[in-house]
Amino acid sequence: MAVADRPILAGMTPDELKAFVVSHGHPAYRATQINDWLCRRFQMVPDAMKNLPSALRQDLQSELHAPSSRIIRRADAGDGTGKLLLSLADDEVIEMVTIPAGDRLTFCLSTQVGCPVRCRFCASGADGLKRNLRCGEILEEYLHGIAAAGKQPENLVFMGIGEGLLNIGELLKSLDRLTSPAGFGMSPRRITVSTSGIVPGIRQLAAVKREYNLAISLHAVNDRIRAELIPDACRYPVQEILRAADEYRETVGRMVTFEYTLLDGINDSRADAAELGRLSRRHHAKINLIPFNETGNGFRRPSRRTIDEFAAEIERNGGHVTVRRERGSGENAACGQLRRQHAAPDNAGLSDN
Ligand code: SF4
């Protein structure tokens, strides 16, 4: 079996584990023990699974990816936010982020290597899509995060590299594993799936009828401005996105969030804010303003005053708005920056893991 086709231990369901152990001549209850190591003790290295016989540990090690990824860099922002750069089995590289806030910990996970959407202001999408992540690779991000942070997160956001709804099969498998009682047991209400507005994906996510939070990166109130920010290939019309958001809220019973990256002189006018306020009211959606994290690609963050006035205008028009607190601004804060810096020759300042 080619290395790339090997199953990934962290992504295997209890049934798949059972089929594996039985087909290798071990009793079925060993699958429960392996599952407990993964989901209760967050251990993905067979040699550390001490109650397994060495022959089974050997089978797991030689026939599966266990694990398939490893941490190659860490960056700490100084405010507790940590970024892990992970190398995959085929030497591709992704990021995951750990974000503590008070006594709560949030993980931000990637779903693809690169991103096909190629938003013009985003470092992650600059080189397009390399490939989708497999369910096991997504779950390994989660497990590496737990090992680095020393605990399971209270919240999980799929806002890292990639457009998760364009990798929805593997995303749904990982969501299932993260929330099933036999898996990691997280509440769906503690998980947020972010999308750039992939309408068929929003409908597929709604169809599973789990209470995942949905965050739609609107970034513009009309198609003209949106076309300046998101290339045609993966962009859906604003009205279609709003309809899909309504359907999601009605089907799942969760309020949708519209993410709005504020870019100086592009989408930060008073008229934009007023329209966003009206959209928020009409569609019962929260607005999350994200002051742009400058990455040297020509886009600029508006002044503090513009951001405050923009938020106030949304509220005056009946909208419900929050401004995202800056986290990780000290070190490669925007998503994809650490990965791009790794690809470039000058990656000084990061500590080798
Ligand atoms: S902002 Fe999100 S959807 Fe857009 S290119 Fe970056 S990772 Fe992809």
Image: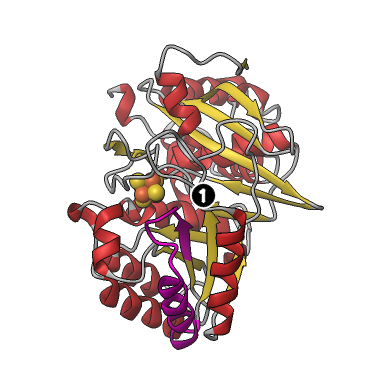
Percent x, y for residue 302?
51, 53
> Residue drawn at (38%, 67%), measured in percent from left and top?
205
> Residue drawn at (47%, 13%), measured in percent from left and top?
346
At mark 1, the secondary structure is helix
Please tell me whether residue 321 is drawn above or below residue 198 in the rendered image. below
Q: Which of 292 and 212 is in front in this view?
A: 292
Q: What is the span of residues highlighted in magenta in the rendered image?
A: 259-284
Q: Is residue 282 magenta?
A: yes
Please tell me whether residue 262 is drawn above or below residue 339 in the rendered image. below
Q: Quadrant of the C terminus?
A: top right
Q: Nearer the viewer, residue 340 or 133?
A: 340
Q: How is the image coloured?
A: secondary structure
- The residue singled out by tag 1 in the image is 14
Percent x, y for residue 183?
58, 53
Assess disc 1: are there few (<14), some (14-19) or many (≥20) residues with their C-alpha within 10 Å of its C-alpha.
Answer: some
- The picture quadrant where one finds residue 45 is top right
Q: Can residue 265 be spotted in the picture?
A: yes
> Residue drawn at (49%, 50%), measured in percent from left and top?
159
Q: Is residue 310 magenta?
A: no
Q: Can residue 34 be spotted in the picture?
A: no
- The picture quadrant where one finds residue 327 is top right
Percent x, y for residue 345?
42, 12
Residue sitting farthest toward the left: 233
Percent x, y for residue 28?
54, 43
- In the rendered structure, which amino acid carries the disc numbered 1? Pro
Please tell me whether residue 338 is drawn above or below residue 138 in the rendered image. above
Q: In which quarter of the image is the N terminus?
A: top left
> Residue drawn at (81%, 52%), measured in percent from left and top?
102
